[in-house]
Image (cartoon, coloured by chain):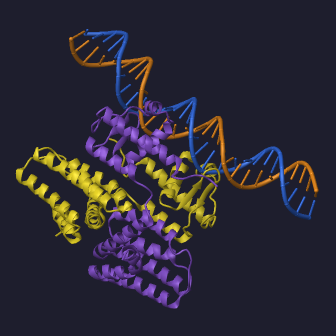
Chain colours: A purple, B yellow, C blue, D orange
Amino acid sequence: MKLELLSKGDHQTTQNQIISKLRDVINAKNLEPGDKLPSERMLSEKFEVSRSNVREAIQLLEFYGLLKSKPQSGTFVADIGQIAMNGMIDDILALGDPDFRSLVETRILFELKTVRLAAQRRSQEDLDSIEAALEAYKEKVLNCENAVQEDLLFHLAIAKASGNSTMNTFMLMITPKIITNFEKYHVCDKGQAQKGIKEHQDIFEAIKKQDIQLAKEMMKVHFGVLYQYCYNVKG
Amino acid sequence: MKLELLSKGDHQTTQNQIISKLRDVINAKNLEPGDKLPSERMLSEKFEVSRSNVREAIQLLEFYGLLKSKPQSGTFVADIGQIAMNGMIDDILALGDPDFRSLVETRILFELKTVRLAAQRRSQEDLDSIEAALEAYKEKVLNCENAVQEDLLFHLAIAKASGNSTMNTFMLMITPKIITNFEKYHVCDKGQAQKGIKEHQDIFEAIKKQDIQLAKEMMKVHFGVLYQYCYNVKG
DNA sequence: TTAAAATAATTGGTTAACCAATTTGAACAC
DNA sequence: GTGTTCAAATTGGTTAACCAATTATTTTAA
């Protein structure tokens, strides 16, 4: 038996320690937006870790928009004041792997919003893409095959048609995590198949008609089961 | 004059090319979930790029949950079928830098949702954090100082209190991008100051009372101006 | 012939060396 | 003193060498 209680990834732990130390450096030196941090080499020596570890930590903070590295110059504090910097780093350090329920909850939020935006903004090209995804889905279902992939692409096509690149990106980030943890197996139920097809078809038609409210309602129906899973577990 | 038309980042371009080639490899070899990709060294030779470039591309696809690297073994296709794999990689390749409007639109969506969840789920500790952020905000505003940072932390405290780690993470990702592009300067207007304080106070009180609907309404009022910016630009 | 053991090759990850752009500061002309 | 030039040091980024774990292959024993 491997005793790994509260291990949580050795890598992750040291990474968070470095980030924490980076915050300390920023505070100790009273660095403000535009100020330069010590070089990666100095930091790696000071923290007694490898330079690549420091680089990785800096890159994460860069990802969150807190730092900015300039090629042959140095790493600089982004346009974020010290107070916000400290608060945000604390928040980042407190982040853990997202739980499944929060993923589902977030997905439903996105689905209900993107479908409205798609109904409102979709171009003809968008509509064609969604329809193609729908047809692929229907074909698989009618052949009694697993259509998880086609289902996913249908929803991603809607996200794309929403014209909101941020939501589109986020959908790409969370949806695979959900479908790989969900419906591992496939059962061929005639009733379920028809229900699934109808729900997708209804959503598509609403988008086509540009009926925003209807599109949202149809999507709500489609996610009814998952919705229950999220909000009625307690009750 | 530097002719950089459609440059879009040299790095980004080669990266996308590699990702595209990775997709081709997966298709050519008909790789399915669990199957192993060629080694990084082989790929770098085949693509005629450095191994670190290949690694970077693989890591991005790993970020989106499409691949999975195992330390001294190899890189494997995650639990995503070929159809979804192709569709998702296409989507990823089509992603561009998010436009400002989509960021704002997404932020408002999150704010309206997290404030409801916060009103519903907040612990006493959450409430204390939010109140502390509110007090810090009020103090700055009453002193006629710029309170952008305190405003940000107030909203992030609400996101944290929502109990949804996914939304919390996403809020951390987009909010800084917005505030750094917005309200670059600060004007001290007595009326505006009081208005800002009242709006924040109202939101806090609603969360404290756990009045979900009211919390949402107060947040909607708070983001009224931004909301207009998003949805009434055309009209 | 087959199972097991030993060894060689391969793997992603890590570290160290290297690079070109930038920055710094000393030398120097006026 | 002051502005300019130029060389040396510093920087983040990149490449190549190295590592330990894993996997494939060969050898060996029964």
Residue B71, how many percent across, how many down? Answer: 61, 51
The residue drawn where x is 11% and y is 43% is: B143
Indicate left or right for B74 with B158 as reference: right
* B189 vs A213: above or below: above
The residue drawn where x is 58% and y is 55% is: B69
* A31 vs B123: above or below: above
The residue drawn where x is 50% and y is 61% is: B65
**In front: A182, or A132?**
A182
The residue drawn where x is 23% and y is 70% is: B212
**In front: A235, or B100?**
A235
Q: Is residue B33 visible?
A: yes
Q: Total of numbered circles in the picture?
A: 0
Indicate left or right for A181 with B214 as reference: right
Hey, which residue is sitting farthest left in the picture? Answer: B190
Residue D1, how many percent across, how many down? Answer: 21, 11
Hey, which residue is sitting farthest front in the picture? Answer: B124
Hey, which residue is sitting farthest bottom in the picture? Answer: A191
Quadrant of res A20: top left
The C terminus of chain B, quarter of image: bottom left
Indicate left or right for B130 with A181 as reference: left
Residue C3, how many percent across, how many down? Answer: 85, 60
Q: Is residue B50 visible?
A: no
* B23 vs A81: above or below: below
The N terminus of chain B, quarter of image: top left
Residue B202, how many percent across, how many down? Answer: 15, 62
Quadrant of res B169: bottom left
